[in-house]
Amino acid sequence: MEKNFKRTLVTTALPYANGPVHIGHLAGVYVPADIYVRYLRLKGEEVLFIGGSDEHGVPITIKAKAEGVTPQDIVDRYHNIIKDSFGELGISFDVYGRTTSETHRKMASDFFRRLYDKGEFVEKSSEQLYDEQAGQFLADRYVTGTCPHCGNEHAYGDQCEACGTSLNATDLINPRSAITGNVPVMRETSHWYLPLDKWEPRLREWILEEHKEWKPNVYGQCKSWLDLGLQPRAVSRDLDWGISVPVEGAEGKVLYVWFDAPIGYISNTVDCVGDDWTKWWKDPETRMLHFIGKDNIVFHCIVFPAMLMADGTYNLPDNVPANEFLNLEDDKISTSRNWAVWLHEYLRELPGKQDTLRYVLTANAPETKDNNFTWKDFQTRNNSELVAILGNFINRAVVLAGKYYDGKVPEAGEFTDFDRATMDEIARAVAAVGENLDNFKFREALREAMNVARAGNKYLADSEPWKLAKTDPERVGTILNLALQICADLAVVFEPFLPFMSEKLCRMLGLESLGWDMAGRFDLLPAGRQLGEVELLFEKIEDSTVEFQVNKLLEAKKQNQLAAWKPAPVKENVDFPTYEKLDIRVGRVLECEKVKKADKLLRFLIDDGMEKRTIVSGIAKHYAPEDLIGKEVCFIANFEPRKLKGIVSEGMILSAEDADGRLVVIGPQGEVAPGSTVG
């Protein structure tokens, strides 16, 4: 039976403050959460929107060591970048806090201590890798070695980035400390564990029986974990960055970041509303929603609820509408490879286009499966939908009112059946927007919102008021009145999705406040109201803008390849007489063409200084034949001739393989006579 709540608490996953946020984060978490919160506010519901930075954990300490600064320096820098860019995109948090605040330190410490005093933890000893020179235990990311699965010599202790396999540091072959480079030793250490297995029966009942309405991807992942059986999970670790374990004898130990971070939702609430925070976390009439990506499902549906169950005084989440992942240009987004569209860079390079990004990310939201972002689709959706449909309709309606009624809302006469059919279609679309938002189907909701604009466009195109201006001015007034009322509806239904556009449209129409109960009505603008100045809502995105962004990504990929590239090992030594047997010469390319039915082969006709010779070379994917004609190239002249695709090849053209796999033909830098020897 569905429960009625008085208020809603919405949280979003806390981004790690060791780098900026990218479009994958936005599409998976922050844009849908903001849409939903804005929708609730329009409905007049009491809602609190909580966000913040996750500022503890090993990735932050690693970045700090790499840059030669303190972890606090790192989190201060990225917290501000993230917070400012969220604000500029219109993510309307009531508070955006941080887990290095004093409020959070006390909340997390007290939370641990309550569970400790209740006997909710078990203490266990185990052997872990220890760096004797550094004098510290090594977190998984501080251990590197050879992957036992693929042989990658630079695998981390938690994962091999070459083959993607999850690892334990003790799985690595020839492990080394990432701090000193020394071989670590095994040393015993003790930690506290949350016995998830104790809470498994209650979690199974709560999730699998009481929350079958959760999204299939969320429900399915939870069921898989529960079916495998839950195990105790460490809540402390040996590290010098984090919240100290508040127990005597726990020096050098901090709360594990997975335990500390979700308490940030609570501490940020305290910083936002003060003593009123318990209403949002402990009143059973408050509904709690976690917006997260799929990599956080287990933590928010199983681990954090188990923590709350162990405490016994908190509400449990009512829903966790997690999304899947967003890919970029058909490749997985990777922060380490810089294969990402970073929000702060987007805002700088495409100023004023916050709504375009919000629109495209929502239209491509990875709600039930991984989806893909491409710059070409970004351009197409902006130009063909935002400009040509939404912006075009609003502009036409307001401009026509300016032309025929001095920029005032005309009086409406009797609506015809044609008018009412359009009104019915818009009312249906508006209702569908709300229904889809209620069920966290943001992509469908956006499509229905755009259908309101489509209906308005079709209405103006079919009624053709410009043709009736002289013969039936009363009818023109009715048409334009309805068109402007539809514009007002658009200001309401698009406010959750495109808040900047909605704000501009409200100024144009003279709407001072919006409420969801206004959507689908056709009496929002009184006759005679003076409309504001026409503003450009959207502008076309040119090919040059898209090309710049695509080239930026390709350059990042190239730089990443160069950074990862290693030259091939040097072959066994050969003596000088063996080298002297090779006859390397310079030749001039007279002819060059592709070999039929061979994708990789080019046929060369070479002037070798004495005669002409044919050479076949496998570089067709790297050069156009016409680009090589007239060039001087180096080739081995005394190779035994061999037949390739029916062509006798009389030598080998020399080429070098670049870091990105590109073959570059080797030749002299200056003009050299064909037949000159190389040695």
Image (tube, rainbow, N blue to C red):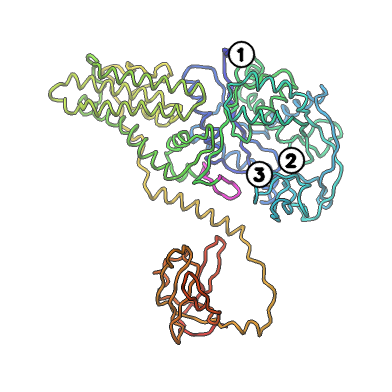
Where in the figure is residue 645, as x and y percent of width and height? Answer: 48, 69
Measured Cα–Cα span from mark 2 to mark 1: 37 Å
Q: Quadrant of the N terminus?
A: top right
Q: CA distance from mark 3 to mark 2?
A: 12 Å
Residue 579 visible in the current orientation: yes
> Could you say which disc has been placed on residue 133 in the image?
none
Image quadrant containing the C terminus: bottom right
Amino acid type at circle 1 is Glu
Q: Which residue has dot 2 on it?
A: 241
Residue 285 numbered mark, or none: 1
Q: In front here: 390 or 274?
A: 390
Assign the magenta stretch its main secondary structure.
loop
Sequence-first disc among 3 and 1: 3
Instruction: Point out which mark residue 73 bears.
Output: 3
Q: Position of residue 22 (x, y in %)?
A: 54, 41
Residue 158: x percent and y percent? 71, 45
From where the camera sits, is residue 303 visible? no
Residue drawn at point x = 36 percent, y = 19 percent: 427
Vertical comparison of 386 with 159: above or below: above
Nearer-the-camera pick, 438 or 349? 438
Q: Tag 1, which secondary structure?
A: loop
Q: Quadrant of residue 592?
A: bottom left
Magenta residues span: 332-344
- Does residue 338 belong to the magenta stretch? yes
Q: Amino acid at mark 2?
A: Trp
Residue 32 against residue 284 in the figure, above or below: below
User: Which badge, 2 or 1, is on the more N-terminal residue?
Assistant: 2
